[in-house]
């Protein structure tokens, strides 16, 4: 029941074609992930990809904070 309720809140976005924001460097496979988050006007991008997104953890790119899922969960628990 909870999954059904949560899945109703999911919106899918396709990545825009185009360049990454200035100063951002990612492998080609990761570019659509960031561009889709930008297109969705996301506030957070959660990823365990420390190798490629690690340099951007805790930073905002186009208003999106990049962070590990566990850090996000801890942050949300402190707020609640």
Image (cartoon, rainbow, N blue to C red):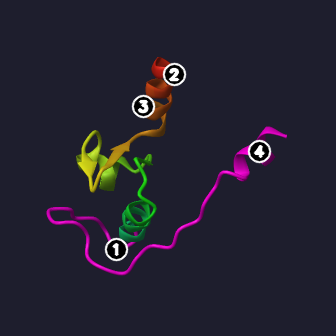
Residue at the spot of label 1: 28
Query: Is there a contact, CB below 8 Å, between mark 4 and mark 3?
Result: no
User: Where is residue 3 drawn, in percent x and y?
Assistant: 77, 44
Residue at the spot of label 3: 71
User: Where is residue 1 drawn, in percent x and y?
Assistant: 85, 40
| 62 is higher (above) or lower (below) than 4 | below
Residue at the spot of label 4: 5
Q: Which numbered mark, 2 or 4, is in the foreground of this view?
A: 4
User: Where is residue 48 drawn, in percent x and y?
Assistant: 44, 46
Label 2 vs 3, first from the N-terminus: 3
Where disc 2 sits, the SS reads helix
Where disc 4 sits, the SS reads helix
Where disc 1 sits, the SS reads loop
Q: Residues within 10 Å of mark 3 (few under 14, many from 20)?
A: few
Q: CA distance from mark 2 to mark 3?
A: 10 Å
Q: Which numbered mark, 3 or 1, is in the foreground of this view?
A: 3
Magenta segment, prevailing SS (helix, strand or loop): loop
The furthest residue to the left: 23
Task: Give, as a single range, the part of the protein colored magenta.
Answer: 1-29
Label 4 vs 3, first from the N-terminus: 4
């Amino acid at each position: 029941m909870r999954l059904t309720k949560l899945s109703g809140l999911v919106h899918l976005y396709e990545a825009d074609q185009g360049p990454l924001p200035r100063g951002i460097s990612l492998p080609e496979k990761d570019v659509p992930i960031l561009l889709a988050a930008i297109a969705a006007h996301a506030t957070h991008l959660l990823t365990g990809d420390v190798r490629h997104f690690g340099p951007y953890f805790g930073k905002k790119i186009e208003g999106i904070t990049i962070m590990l899922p566990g850090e996000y969960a801890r942050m949300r628990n402190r707020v609640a």
